[in-house]
Image: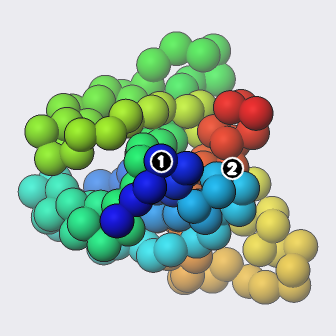
Amino acid sequence: MTNGSDKTLLGIDYGTRRIGVAKCDSMGIIASALVTLEVKSRQQALKQICELIAEYHPVGIVFGYPLLASGDISKKCIEIDRFIELLLPEFDGPIHRTDERYTSVEAQSIIHAHGKKVGQDKKRIDRLAAVLILKRFMDEQQ
């Protein structure tokens, strides 16, 4: 159950096969990796995200929005917009979009900087990208 000062947000790095999810603390200060969902359809993605909403009771959701280098909307942005349309009836809080350009590249760099190999662990990149998306949004709100 949330209270008036709860600032818990979910950050989403949306993909057609994997969805990285991050969560911030109730004070809206620290973003941390939560889970990488593996999905086969938009309906399955919707169901799993709704389960996370029921479990964590976020006050808002932040989707990474992969704009083109020019700043224009990409095909992936349109796909995310369609998914958000499905999510709107299921979630009564605000749903934000934040520019996620280069978050996956940044996530890979962070993993390499810690002496780890990305290899086949794409799920780790998706979770970390979701953290970066959420952190970027939180920083913009400050």
Relative horizontal placement of residue 75, taking residue 7 as reference (left or right): left
Q: Which mark is residue 62?
A: none
Amino acid at the residue labelled 1: Gly
Q: Which residue is mark 1?
A: 4
Q: Is residue 76 above or below residue 39?
A: above
Q: Is residue 73 above or below residue 115?
A: above
Report the label total. Answer: 2
Q: Position of residue 41 (x, y in %)?
A: 14, 59
Q: Helix, strand or loop at disc 1?
A: loop
Residue displayed at 69% across by 49% down: 135
**Nearer-the-camera pick, 19 or 118:** 19
Which numbered disc flags the more N-terminal residue, 2 or 1? 1
Residue displayed at 76% across by 33% down: 142
| Crowd class of label 2 (few under 14; some 14 to 19; many from 20; radius 10 Å) | many
Relative horizontal placement of residue 92, taking residue 142 as reference (left or right): left
Amino acid at the residue labelled 2: Lys
Q: Let me know if residue 50 appears in the view.
A: yes
**Nearer-the-camera pick, 54 or 135:** 54
